[in-house]
Image: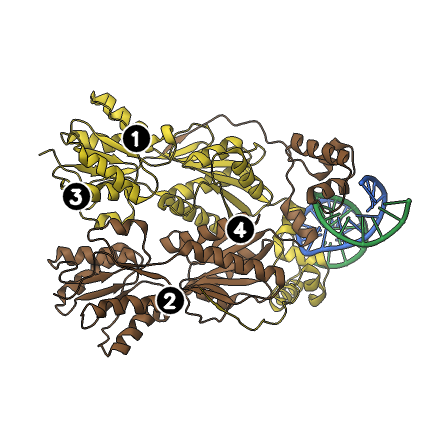
Chain colours: A brown, B yellow, C blue, D green
Amino acid sequence: MKVTKEPAPPLRQKVPVLSDVAKAAGVSVPTVSRVLTSSKFVAPELRDRVMKAVAELGYRPNGAARATRSGKRSMVAVLTGGTSNYGYAKTIEGIEKAARQSGMSVIIAVVESDDDEAVNAAIDLVLSQPVAGVIILEFDRPGLAAVKAFPSSIPLVVAGGGTRRTGKTGALLDERGAGKDATNHLLSLGHKTVHHVSVPTMGKHSGRTDGWRAALTAAGATIPPVLHATWEPASGYRVGQELAANEDVTAVFCGNDDVAIGVIRALLDSGRRVPEDVSVVGFDDQPHVALWRPALTTVRQDFQDLGARAFTLLAATVETGTPPGSSTVKPELILRESTAAVG
Amino acid sequence: MKVTKEPAPPLRQKVPVLSDVAKAAGVSVPTVSRVLTSSKFVAPELRDRVMKAVAELGYRPNGAARATRSGKRSMVAVLTGGTSNYGYAKTIEGIEKAARQSGMSVIIAVVESDDDEAVNAAIDLVLSQPVAGVIILEFDRPGLAAVKAFPSSIPLVVAGGGTRRTGKTGALLDERGAGKDATNHLLSLGHKTVHHVSVPTMGKHSGRTDGWRAALTAAGATIPPVLHATWEPASGYRVGQELAANEDVTAVFCGNDDVAIGVIRALLDSGRRVPEDVSVVGFDDQPHVALWRPALTTVRQDFQDLGARAFTLLAATVETGTPPGSSTVKPELILRESTAAVG
DNA sequence: CTGAAAGCGCTTACAG
DNA sequence: CTGAAAGCGCTTACAG
């Protein structure tokens, strides 16, 4: 690591406050406040003088003081188990965009694990700021734990995979239905059963896993033990090697695209063809999986929309004081090259 | 979209404030403040009573009021052109983690474009909160515009690809050096020249593009026109089709992994083999590209570390009042299967 | 329409 | 060590 020493810049000057603007404009402090919040009528001339002073001084209202006095909060917080995996990042993107369009800022706190200490630390961090409300990403166990531990005095909305274990209002994705669709697709191709590789989402309570199991049960197919992967594509590769060693495996439903990619590569490296010998389905539809060889059949989840819906729900909760109903969207199965009828 | 109507929960109760705690503990307000900020000595007995009241009432300090009175700010803002692309998401993850470990919250605002209106709107949004400082992701034109427009009265640090066009202190990645390495690797394999596909980062001022051009120039190779892709992998596919149609193309250096994936698939679909006929190098090293077929030779950028370094720099700036020197890390070229000596 | 006054929740000198 | 008082930057009744 190279470190470059630079000359220190001039000392920062004091940031201007409301009274500086008032002085510069030759009006009282409340008058400046009034033109800035446009709450009351102000004579056009004074208004002009104020706006001019604001521009000249580069004044920006101090949101903290504003929130302290008026109780109006202009931040929403998102509490989440992670920020960089595809679904998380896209959901946050959707929230941020919707918030920005409403003039609100978003503050992010990650919940490291589902143990009490981590959960409370994250909640404390978030609630020590003047937030209007909170969106919790109920994608994983830390998220779930945060929902459970969250105090009821703050408006809360969840965004998640629709396991609905907490019963909170939220924007949901019908993961269970999508898991069923994916499994039924494979079954309809003539596969006797479908193996499943899970990712570290809800553990035993994953909607996709539930849907897979339900579809198998409904079809009277045997239910193979669930195989577990981490978020790392490489762990998909390891699981794929196990799968490749098992002659009975002809169809695999993976918990996400990264894992599917690992599984496919392991299968191929072991001499099993995809989809001729083994069909594989992913989950998420990251943009690049359409270009994979074979192009991945997967479940498309619209995370950005999920984030936007969550924000809308939260805004309504904050405004009316009571949470509106939840909204659920069913992800769509996208058929591509990685699945085929059994030979 | 299915909408579920649920019964409204009981009305939210008022959140407890410092004076509630003081009353419950039978002490004065300043005493509660003192135990919470542990600024002065407090008798153990009073301290216990206060802590008990805090726990019972579920009191959490109001950060806005705190910031208003003490001037101590517990938020850092990140201003960025995007949040969900791999490099952005990972950098934000690094910042969030470092901030959390210092007890600070992070607030995010995206700068939609590099036009004045969007830039100022994002800056206003961020500065209306009590932030201790700001990290701007100088990965693209909106980020660059934000750096230029940012008022000097607030501590600022950039995180970026090291083009250093603004001269601000920052955590940097030596993209230019990495671009040179990638190009030289291809040249050393016997390729007469290297084609380049750019992504929408800094436009003409991209470090990776500069490095590519510099390496070509140093080697006395001809410099083919730069081809442009968007952030979408599919755009890489389109560019790849152009490349495939050109017999002279034997080596391609791509602006990122997603584009490389699109380029490779197009090459393959056109009957050109990779790496036998054409070598391809990516940029970023997203975890799944090691499992691609062929496994992608690419430049590994440690974005999480970048984010952590940026936070450290910002913390130092806030503390000492003057920015320390910038730090630069050179990304590492990872050799895999997508590059080979010319046949 | 505009200013003097009070107050949001907190922290920080200041007395005791 | 602890409480009464002042004050951070702002907004919101209240008079005029």
Q: What element carries label 2?
A: loop
- Note whether residue B102 is visible: no
Mark 3 and mark 2: Cα distance apart in space:
39 Å
Instruction: Please tell me how crowded label 4 is: few (under 14), some (14-19), or many (20+) other residues with Cα within 10 Å.
Output: many
Few, some or many residues within 10 Å of mark 3 (<14, 14–19, 20+): some
Residue A202 image label: 2
Q: In which quarter of the image is the C terminus of chain A?
A: bottom left
Query: Are labels 1 and 3 on one chain?
Result: yes
Question: Secondary structure beneath disc 4?
Answer: helix
Q: Name the residue under label 4.
A: A99
Which of the two residues, A214 or A8, is positioned nearer the viewer here? A214
Name the image quarter holding residue B56: bottom right
Q: Are marks 3 and 2 on the same chain?
A: no
Labels 1, 4: one chain: no
Closest to the camera, between mark 1 and mark 2, is 2
Q: On the image, numbered disc 3 is attached to which residue?
A: B268
Look at label 2 and name its amino acid. Answer: Met
